Image (cartoon, helix red, strand yellow):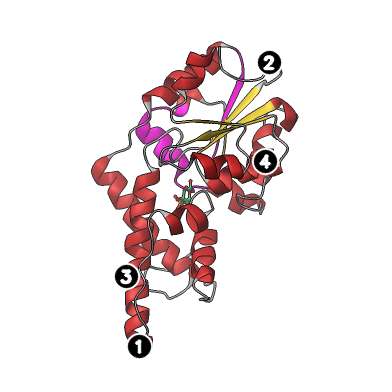
Amino acid sequence: MLGLPDHVSACLFDLDGVLTRTAKVHAAAWKEMFDDYLRQRAARDGSPFVPFDAVRDYDEYVDGRPREDGVRTFLASRGLTLPEGTVSDGPDQETVHGLGTRKNDLVLRAIREQGVESYEGSVAYVRAVRDAGLHRAVVSSSANCRDVLVAAGIEDLFEGRVDGVTVAEQGLRGKPAPDSYLAGARLFGTDPRDAAVFEDALAGVAAGKAGGFGFVVGVDRTGQADELRAHGADVVVTDLSELLDRG
Ligand SMILES: O=P(O)(O)OC[C@H]1O[C@@H](O)[C@H](O)[C@@H](O)[C@@H]1O
């Protein structure tokens, strides 16, 4: 009835793009921030401006990773490095944290202005998981995870949360490393082999695979089913409600 192997007793859900319609908000904010920065840098260096690709660059270097990892990984793909700076860096600092702050300001503004919507199919699925007596946690790289869950009105559906704040506080490696999902399984004392991971990001699916999780569900919102499979998804759906239909 949940479309999962019978031995699965805990479900670990990514947030942005799986539970809430916020992956697009993040992708747009990354594009605006990186394009501003790359344009400025190109003008300064006299080099051509090559914009951030909101599909390819986002999926490959940014999606699913903690904020500062996204900054570093994308810049590295262009052969660029910046000083780390510190968490308190403002948006004008030319540092990894400063660029992260610029992007986060854009995300917070968009969330404030547009609100947050959940995916109906995901909410129905999480309710079915709850009714079947399985554990449920959110495992997200986002430091805004709690606020987004509250804004979407779905915080109460989950028994636990591992998010960008947890990752920073506990010094966990971000997705695609499996650390945050393993921490999610530990919340319930569940062996990863008995837990399922639900992910839309290539880095997140790779984290589920690397952690030896019993079942990895790839959620394809953007037409990247083949890449999700290649990164380790056991099954790919376009909406979690499809799993309910599978019985
Ligand atoms: O900047 P935040 O809210 O801490 O989020 C970090 C990352 O969280 C992930 O969930 C998103 O897929 C990324 O796009 C985002 O950059």
Are the two marked residues, 1 and 4, in contact with CB atoms closer than 8 angstroms?
no
Q: Measure how far apart labels 2 and 3 are at the Cα level.
A: 49 Å
| Dot 3 alpha-carbon crowd within 10 angstroms: few under 14, some 14 to 19, many 20 or more | few
Q: Measure how far apart labels 1 and 2 are at the Cα level.
A: 60 Å
**Residue type for callout 3:** Asp
Q: Measure how far apart labels 4 and 3 are at the Cα level.
A: 35 Å
Residue 209 tag number: 4
Residue 6 tag number: 2
Badge 3 or badge 1: first in the primary sequence: 3
Q: At 66% from the left edge and 54% from the top edge, which residue is drawn?
A: 171
Quadrant of the frame with the N terminus: top right
- Judge whether 97 appears above or below 122 on screen: below
**Residue type for callout 1:** Gly
Considering the numbered disc 4 on the image, is that residue within a helix, a strand or a loop?
helix
Quadrant of the frame with the C terminus: top right
Residue 118 tag number: none
Badge 2 or badge 3: first in the primary sequence: 2
